[in-house]
Amino acid sequence: MTANLLERSTPDILRALLDRTAGDLVIVDPNADVMESLVDIAADYGDDLPTLNVLADGRLLKDVMDDFLVAADAADLVDAGHMTLRELETEADNTLVVGGDDLYALVSAGEHVAALAADDEEFVADAYETYRGRWEEAEAFNLRTPALSRVRSTLDEDIGEAVRADFDSVLDSLETARGDGDGLDEVTISLLVAAKNDVLLYDISKWGEDVGIASKATFSRTKTRLEDMGLIDTEKVPIDVGRPRLRLKLGDDRLREADGDELASVAYRMLN
């Protein structure tokens, strides 16, 4: 008989579910905590990860994927075929994890999270058929963020290994990358690590547009804002034909003295 599970946190309960299930799973109507935790755990799970077919509210997916750290990991999972993201038209009564032989409802209470199991085989089979059918009919969610592996590899190839290393250090130091007051967004991070390494604005903005992070215009607007606030300086670099290009430099000693893993926290304090 399938047993109920009880853990201290959402990541713990999801890890326990993934450890005991096989085949593909349909994740129905996850909340933001479940969605973020699912991506985080799946990104590090390894080769035995079941295929995770997520059926979620489109507005919730958009909000969760506004965090570059979550979205870029999710894009890697989608590219690898480990995860699909589709939009749920009507809410379920609970967040459900549905497999061919397993059905769990996730419930939070106090300091614990439970996965309450259904043990009626016919009901579980019917639930899987129902929600698998809803997933197949649902519209795919448009995840615009590029996969983190592609961001890293192209940054290394197009801009340089030192910039990629600083980019990784900044991401590793962050809990979120939204740029909405709770953190730094991916364009700001890219410009800061470029400035730390004296990269041309043209080069980093072209890379960012080519890889799918943001347009050159967005990079330019963000550069102007950071320059106005004293985080970034620029110097003109003459070229053979056309207008001089701008080399990015850090504009404050606090940033220039910061290590890669400190750059984000120093910049965040200056911006807030």
Image (spheres, grey):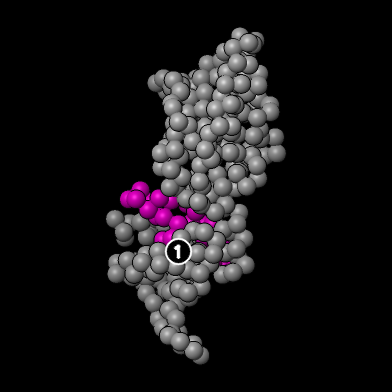
Extreme-bottom residue of the structure? 240
The residue segment tinted magenta is 160-189
Is any atom of residue 8 visible in this view? Answer: no
Up-down: is 142 above or below 257?
above
Residue bearing the label numbered 1: 215
Magenta includes 172? yes
Give x and y (percent) for residue 37.
Answer: 51, 36
Give x and y (percent) for residue 103.
Answer: 58, 19
Q: Residue at x 59, y 26 (%)?
A: 132
Residue 41 or 207: which is nearer the viewer? Answer: 207
In the picture provided, is 40 more to the left or to the right than 252?
right
Please identify the quadrant where the N terminus is shown: top right
Residue 195 or 52: which is nearer the viewer? Answer: 52
In the picture provided, is 15 more to the left or to the right than 65?
right
The quadrant where residue 110 appears: top left
**Three-letter amino acid code of the residue under disc 1:** Ser
Give x and y (percent) for residue 19.
Answer: 64, 27
Q: Residue at x 51, y 47 (%)?
A: 143
Please identify the quadrant where the C terminus is shown: bottom left
SS label for mark 1: loop
Is any atom of residue 153 visible in this view? Answer: yes
Residue 127 or 186: which is nearer the viewer? Answer: 127
Q: Residue at x 41, y 83 (%)?
A: 236
Up-down: is 40 above or below 68?
above
